[in-house]
Each structure stands twice: as structure tokens, then as C-alpha cells.
Amino acid sequence: MTTILTVCTGNICRSPAAELLLARALEGHATVASAGTHALVDHGIPEHMLAELAQDGIDGAAHRARLLTERVMHEADLVIAMTAEHRRLAVSTGPFALKRTFTLSELAAAAGTGAVLEGETSEERLRDLPRAVAAHRAVLAGCELDDVPDPYRKDATAYRESYGLIRGAVAEISDWVLGTD
């Protein structure tokens, strides 16, 4: 089974939201975890993000932040960063993961612009994702790839906007990967 790692700064807002949404969307097809480049180790998800998750029936109360390390990078088949800077820091932590590390917006854009995943099953398509996105880079170069803004220590609206971007991207990616399964 493919292991996906989502990455943000503190591992308390964006990456755990992406982790939990992906885990639900890809249940049975992938294992999903998260980590932070500057993690607030052992901290939980802030109330505003917990509220956003709860509206989708997801309980994030058990989440505890952890630091992105080389070992954590080794465990991942696919690394999904919330911003271009997170992608850079993830690759700096684990250079061996360069070809399997993308931003959330890159993956959503690849899904939305016709990148073709090869494989009969969702698991095969997940494993093919890095190749498909790399082959689609010329198309992606013309796309506006937005970072997911950090809502930490901001108001509920900032959390709602950040969560909405993550939720939309996860839906796009999971529909692409799951296909007709």
C-alpha cells in the first residue's frame, strides 16, 4: 500500500487537515501521515481547524504534531507539501525524495489538466502519480500554483479558507486516483 506524507510548517493546521481528508478519501488504498518542517511537537490541532474537520465528520482530536525527519521522508512513497517552501525544505531533509515530492496545488492542477495516470487499480495509479506529474510538468508550468495559506493564530475565516483549498484539492486528487474503482 502506498504511503503518503503531507507536510506543512507546524504540523498542526494544514498538513493534518490534508492527512485526515486524504486518509478518508483514499481509505483502503493508501496510508497517510503528516509532519512539520518546524513542528510544534506533540501539539494538537487548533480549535478552528478541528471545527472545519468536524463539519466533514472528521475527528482530529487525536492528532499530535511531529517533526519532519529524514527517517519520516524515507517512509513515504509520495510527499505532498502545502507550499513551495515546504516542498523545498522536505527535499532538503530527504533529497532522495525529490522525484516524489510535490505541492498539493501541483497535484490538483495535474488532476485538473488531464495528466494521465496509468494502472488498472487505485493502488497502481497512486504508484504512478510521480511519473504522471513529472510527464505533465510542461502543462503545469503554465498553471498558477497557489500555496495553501497558513491560518495559524488567525481568525476562523482564515481557517475556513485554508481548509476549503485543501478540501477542494484533495477531492480533485482523490477523484483522479480512484477513477472508476
Image: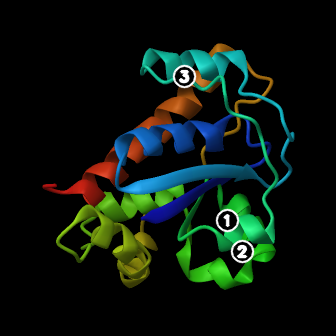
In front: label 1 or label 3: 3
Front residue of this view, candidates 73 and 175: 73
Which disc, if any, is residue 8? none
Is the residue 26 above or below the residue 107 in the image?
above
Quadrant including the C terminus: bottom left
Residue 24 percent across, percent down from the top left: 40, 38
Label 2–label 1 contact, CB within 8 A = yes
Which disc, if any, is residue 91? 2
Instruction: Give the residue at mark 1.
Output: 87
Quadrant including the N terminus: bottom left
Hey, what amino acid is under mark 1?
Arg
Residue at the extreme left: 180
Q: Residues within 10 Å of mark 1 (few under 14, many from 20)?
A: many
Is the residue 123 above or below the residue 137 in the image?
above
Residue at 66%, 17% in the rendered image: 48
Residue at 22%, 75% in the rendered image: 119
Residue at 44%, 76% in the rendered image: 130
Which disc, if any, is residue 59? 3
Quick check: can you spot residue 111?
Answer: yes
Between the C-alphas of marks 1 and 3, the distance is 27 Å
Front residue of this view, candidates 83 and 60: 60
Residue 179 percent across, percent down from the top left: 19, 57
Hey, what amino acid is under mark 2?
Val
Residue 70 percent across, percent down from the top left: 78, 71
Residue 137 percent across, percent down from the top left: 43, 79
Residue at 64%, 78% in the rendered image: 97
